Amino acid sequence: MALYGVCFGAVYRVGDSNGWTSRGLVDYNEWASTKDFHVNDTLIFTYNNQFHNVMQVTNQDFQSCNTTSAMATYTSGSDTVTLNRSGHFYFLCGTPGHCQAGQNVDINVTLPISADGSFASPILAPYGASPSSEVVFLSSASTLHLSKLEFTTVVLCVLGFVL
């Protein structure tokens, strides 16, 4: 028996309409603290790639704004990063002085949990749903739960078993 699945998560534009900038328009950690990030969600970093980049770093490098040993570096100006595990993801801009000026973000990713404390898998989300749309979640205890969404693009997850 094998388990297979396809899951798509919420999509967040880092910094919302301000994007990824060092101009002091966004407190990125405050921005992140207002979101509930889950496994398979996607971050989109939009910025002018002549002046900025995105580096994924360790916690230690994040704390010290160290740009010399990035785990990944993005430079397109419109970068997409899928949050593929739970835990913290640390990002900063590698342009000298930008991290120190606040162009960095700590994204804390969790698994969705249902009201009864069990793992919940989103199973249905209408295409183009508004931020106030409701989505049905199926928990591991096979109980249906309704949850208000707090993001722009919603989750669609299809799971199945192969015998």
Image (cartoon, rainbow, N blue to C red):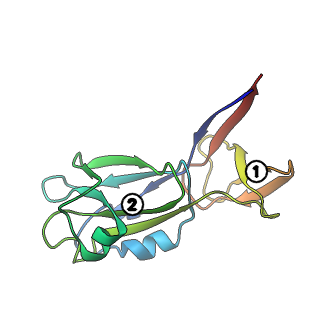
Q: Amino acid at mark 2?
A: Val
Q: Nearer the viewer, residue 72 or 60?
A: 60
Q: What is the quadrant of the N terminus in the image?
A: top right
Left or right of 93, for residue 41:
right
Q: Amino acid at mark 1?
A: Phe
Q: Nearer the viewer, residue 39 or 76?
A: 39
Q: Residue at x 57, y 64 (%)?
A: 36
Mark earlier in primary sequence (2, 1): 2
Left or right of 148, for residue 87:
left
Q: CA distance from mark 2 to mark 1?
A: 26 Å
For the residue carrying disc 2, how many other residues have a C-alpha within 10 Å: few (<14), some (14-19), or many (20+)?
many
Q: How many marks?
A: 2
Q: Residue at x 36, y 76 (%)?
A: 27
Give the residue at mark 1.
Answer: 137
| Location of residue 82 in the rendering, given as x and y in whole percent from the top left corner | 45, 47
For the residue carrying disc 1, how many other residues have a C-alpha within 10 Å: few (<14), some (14-19), or many (20+)?
many
Which SS class for mark 2?
loop
Left or right of 78, for residue 94:
left
Q: Residue furthest front?
A: 1
Give the image quarter of residue 134: bottom right
User: Is the residue 82 above or below the residue 53 in the image?
Assistant: above
User: Is the residue 27 above or below the residue 119 in the image?
Assistant: below
Which SS class for mark 1?
strand
Give the residue at mark 2.
Answer: 14
User: Is the residue 45 above or below the residue 30 in the image?
Assistant: above
Q: What is the quadrant of the C terminus in the image?
A: top right
| Location of residue 104 in the rendering, given as x and y in whole percent from the top left corner | 31, 69
| Location of residue 50 in the rendering, given as x and y in whole percent from the top left corner | 12, 54
Q: Residue at x 50, y 73 (%)?
A: 33
| Location of residue 59 in the rendering, given as x and y in whole percent from the top left corner | 36, 69
Give the image quarter of residue 31: bottom left
